Amino acid sequence: MKKPSLNGINQRIQQASLNPKTLALGLCMLLIAGNLAAQSPGSNPKLRMRGYLRAMPGLQLSKEFSDPSLYSILHNRLNFRWDIASNLDLRLEGRNRLMYHEMYELIPEIDDVFAQDETLIDLSWLWLSDGGWIGHSEVDRMYLSWRKSSWRVRVGRQRVNWGINLVSNPNDLFNTYSFFDFDYVERPGTDAVRVQHFISRLSSIEVAVSPARRGRNMVAAAKYAFNLNGYDIQALGGYYRDRLALGSGWAGHIGEAGFKGELSWFYDLEETAGVDRGNAVAAAGMDYMFPGGTFGVVEFLYNGGYGRSDEDVFLITEPLRPDNIMFSKYALTLNADHSFSPVFNGGMAVMVLPDIDAVFLMPQFRYSVLTDLDLEFVSQFFIGGEGTLLEEAGYALFVSLTYSF
């Protein structure tokens, strides 16, 4: 395994230390951590810290099950919460990752992939890039939350989650995520102002605005949610990156099975030669808890935005847009999770992409070693998809050990 040179590391650290954003974040983290450390456990319930440390080595193989390469990641997450008043709190959450992969050295654009932060405020830092080594830190939650009676207001970097489905979320205008990125369970956040008003126990209205450095990349939308005949319904509309966006979603039951779905339609505000101005993205699925304790999900996706434009995507784990949410036009996903015991469970996800002749398999097993220590085995198999990013992804095996605090 190639080791990063000391000169390279020192240069990266010096560059990071001169960055005002890095200094501000570092000071903030040190002040909060110092305050927490100075308090005895439980003596300051208004200021809390949680997080985890995860070590995850892996092995990646090519599509021919050859050319093995090592992959490793050390992942640390810190979540801070300060209850300023009974109805006001501040959240600061982020992650630090030290990663190694031989592939990183072969991709000139890899620095830009990790360092990019398309939100209004750049809170992503690439503090190490040396050969196959990448060091990256980012803040994905930093917001004030205020609540009073039936009102909720959040300002800052947050997750505005409007999705309903378990796999694909075309209603999620603000925070799409990658189904293949199993190591990021918190999912990305965005800089936004979000106002919620709960009209009744079963109905609400919500408005969110996420500004951007370029005005045409901003997102602003409203959502109305209500209940009709036992179904939770939502309708939404707004502006999505220079496109009109309209959508709807539902969640209910057919017998004892859950039935969920989302539909969004996008329309270009400006015409582009040779490109259809409008496209729809829809996903629907069912879930069921079997008597033996197995939870199953089946979901179908129609991605009308596939092939509409050429977008540079270098990593399979990069989140795609809600108007082009998958690497194909159609996808059928089957997922099953089973608890073998209170401390041991496992599952299998199968995604079929028929129009590009590709299949994705992800078996995984989780074992609770101790109360705060978990061991997990995950495999990912990308089969087919000639000429697509999935073909190049190959196969990967991971083992992770996570300590939560």
Image (cartoon, grey):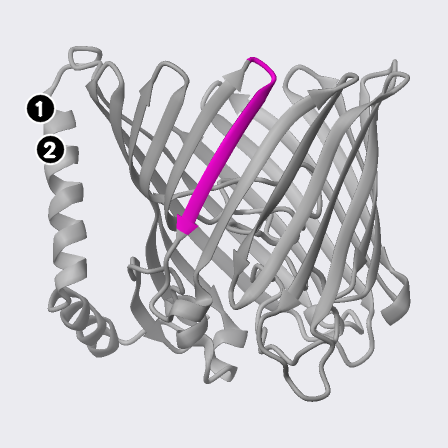
Name the side, left or right, on which 218 lies relative to 342.
left
Q: Which amino acid is tagged 2?
A: Gly
Residue 127 in the image, given as x and y percentages of width and height: 27, 66
6 within the magenta span: no
Residue 166 visible in the current orientation: no
> How far apart in space, not on screen, are marks 2 and 1 (Cα)?
6 Å
Considering the whole magenta stretch, tell me its main secondary structure: strand
- The magenta segment is 201-209
Residue 71 visible in the current orientation: yes
Q: Between residues 354 and 173, which one lies in front from this camera angle?
A: 173
Name the side, left or right, on which 38 lies relative to 110.
left
Name the side, left or right, on which 133 lies relative to 323.
left
The circle drawn on residue 34 is: 2
Badge 2 marks a residue whose secondary structure is helix
Badge 1 marks a residue whose secondary structure is helix
**What residue is drawn where x is 32% and y is 56%?**
137
Specify the quadrant of the image occupied by residue 93: top left
The residue to which callout 1 is attached is 38
Determine whether 309 is above or below 100 in the image. below
Residue 44 in the image, given as x and y percentages of width and height: 16, 15
Q: Which amino acid is tagged 1?
A: Ala
**What residue is drawn where x is 61% and y is 17%?**
202
Label 2–label 1 contact, CB within 8 A: yes
Q: Between residues 223 and 340, which one lies in front from this camera angle?
A: 223
The circle drawn on residue 88 is: none
Residue 128 in the image, given as x and y percentages of width and height: 30, 69
Specify the quadrant of the image occupied by residue 196: top left
